[in-house]
Image (cartoon, rainbow, N blue to C red):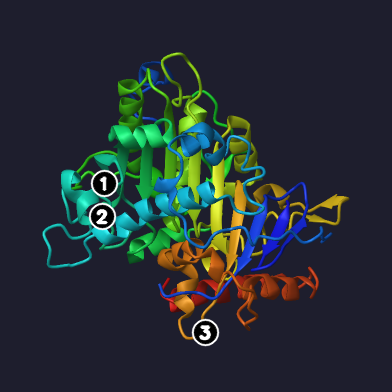
């Protein structure tokens, strides 16, 4: 892992080959089973480096004023073709703008989700597909929504039913296609809102994904709650049929076939729980080999994960890397959700030194991809640590990235380090701390 701390004046780097790249930015917070009829064949048709000045990063980004060919000429790099090498230190303006743009496409999910129990569209989208972008302030985005996506947690609760979780869209505006340098298929997922979804989130156990019917890959394991949301079906659903997974695979396959002779990208974006679904979908598409164009070339898959938890184990991480699924995780180091699941049994606690691997290492949760780490905390509004608008607000104002010290600065890492020093014989301490962290997440109402 290369770790970089970013303040208004300097960046610090740190390398560790077992972990993902991290970029730290300190700042004050501003308020802010494959469908039976589908197959691959028919669907395819800490050492510190010298400080580096970042004063040249401009506080205001106007991507549309860039030369038309700027993004089009390097879109593959922006989408992670080289794991964002040379784009993170400092954060490249085009990459910053794309992170914000995809974040706003996720924000639209929250704006459109109907939480009024009196409404006929309760737990569904407030708007029809043709109106959604306009109604959420993204009428200029150049995307057309092609399908709404619904998910059902496999939880025995009275309120557990299918609910709207996000949408699939594709660029249809010719100017935007030219600016992007390709036609972009986007899947956007909202985060946890309902109680049944929170219960699913805390089903903290690993289970084999088994997405490929020809190869079980028992060592590739994912969190059971996220898998439940992704694969469960609700026969009584009002607006759709089939699991979240089947809906997504069918629609993405349809769009790939429709635009098979064009340059295409697949971008998956989500916040919190939604980032987990985005990561699962990215792995699923790649594992099944559905990301192929007419010539058989791989269509790049990129996941923009905002405030996302861990999704699977080391086997899952390694398989995603092998398949070429690119994941950029935007996290706040003070956000407890990004520490879950696996508060202690994670990629940082798999071995004792470099020689001894612990017995449970194969069952440890592990983050996937490259990490862009922000650092903000607000004592009078602790819930902001998980708020997507706060994340995007900080990214939009790089000039405000000034180093601050608060009692809440990376408090969860400090808690973990403290307990780790107490010895491995008192296993109950780990369980107690994990329970306390879970209680904190719920008490913050995030």
Q: 413 or 426: which is nearer to us?
A: 413
Tell me which numbered mark, 3 or 1, is placed earlier along the sequence.
1
Q: Is residue 330 left or right of residue 430?
A: left
Q: Which mark is residue 379?
A: 3
Residue assigned mark 1? 234
Circle 3 or circle 1, nearest the eye? 3
Picture residue at 33% right of the left edge, 42% below the top: 244
Label 2: element kind: loop
The answer to whether any part of residue 340 appears in the image is no
Extreme residue in the bottom direction? 380
Extreme residue in the top direction? 295
Image height check: is 284 above or below 63? above
Q: 335 or 177: which is nearer to us?
A: 177
Calculate the distance from the C-alpha at mark 3 to the C-alpha at mark 1.
41 Å
Residue 183 position in % (x across, y down): 37, 31
Q: Count residues near mark 3 (Cα–Cα under 10 Å), then give few for <14, some for 14-19, many for 20+.
A: few
Tell me which numbered mark, 3 or 2, is placed earlier along the sequence.
2
Residue 214 position in % (x across, y down): 51, 23
Label 3: element kind: loop
Calculate the distance from the C-alpha at mark 3 to the C-alpha at mark 2.
36 Å
Q: Count residues near mark 1 (Cα–Cα under 10 Å), then give few for <14, some for 14-19, many for 20+.
A: many
Q: 95 or 315: which is nearer to us?
A: 95
Circle 3 or circle 2, nearest the eye? 3
Q: Which mark is residue 161?
A: 2
Residue 92 position in % (x across, y down): 58, 49
């Amino acid at each position: 892992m290369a770790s970089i701390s970013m303040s208004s004046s300097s960046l610090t780097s740190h390398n560790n080959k077992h972990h993902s790249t991290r970029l730290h930015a300190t700042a004050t917070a501003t308020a802010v089973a494959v469908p039976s009829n589908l197959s691959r064949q028919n669907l395819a048709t800490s050492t510190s480096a010298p400080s580096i000045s970042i004063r040249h990063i401009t506080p205001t980004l106007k991507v549309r004023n860039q030369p038309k060919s700027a993004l089009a000429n390097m879109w593959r790099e922006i989408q992670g073709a080289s794991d964002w090498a040379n784009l993170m230190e400092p954060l490249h303006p085009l990459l910053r703008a794309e992170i914000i743009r995809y974040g706003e496409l996720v924000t639209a999910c929250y704006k459109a989700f109907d939480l009024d129990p009196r409404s006929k569209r309760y737990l569904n989208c407030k708007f029809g597909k043709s109106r959604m972008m306009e109604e959420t302030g993204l009428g200029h985005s150049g995307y057309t929504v092609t399908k709404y996506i619904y998910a059902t947690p496999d939880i025995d609760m009275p309120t557990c039913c299918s609910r709207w979780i996000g949408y699939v869209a594709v660029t249809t505006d010719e100017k935007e296609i030219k600016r992007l340098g390709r036609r972009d298929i986007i899947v956007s997922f909202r985060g946890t809102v309902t109680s049944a979804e929170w219960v699913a989130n805390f089903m903290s156990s690993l289970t084999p994904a088994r997405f490929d019917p020809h190869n079980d890959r028992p060592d590739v394991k994912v969190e059971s709650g996220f898998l439940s949301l992704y694969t469960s079906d609700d026969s009584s659903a009002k607006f759709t049929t089939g699991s979240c997974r089947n809906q997504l695979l069918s629609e993405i396959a349809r769009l790939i076939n429709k635009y098979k002779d064009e340059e295409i990208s697949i971008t998956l974006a989500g916040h919190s729980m939604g980032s987990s679904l985005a990561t699962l979908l990215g792995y699923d598409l790649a594992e099944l080999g559905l990301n192929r164009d007419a010539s058989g070339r791989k269509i790049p898959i990129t996941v923009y994960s905002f405030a996302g938890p861990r999704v699977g184990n080391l086997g899952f991480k390694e398989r995603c890397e092998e398949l070429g699924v690119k994941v950029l995780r935007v996290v706040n180091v003070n956000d407890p959700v990004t520490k879950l699941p696996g508060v202690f049994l994670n990629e940082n606690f798999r071995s004792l030194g470099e020689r001894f691997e612990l017995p449970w290492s194969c069952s440890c949760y592990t983050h996937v991809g490259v990490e862009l780490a922000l650092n903000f905390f607000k004592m009078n509004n602790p819930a902001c640590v998980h708020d997507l608008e706060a994340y995007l607000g900080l990214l939009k104002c790089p000039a405000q990235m000034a180093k601050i010290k608060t009692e809440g600065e990376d408090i969860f890492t400090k808690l973990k380090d403290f307990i780790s020093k107490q010895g491995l014989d008192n296993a109950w301490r780990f369980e107690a701390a994990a329970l306390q962290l879970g209680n904190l997440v719920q008490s913050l109402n995030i």
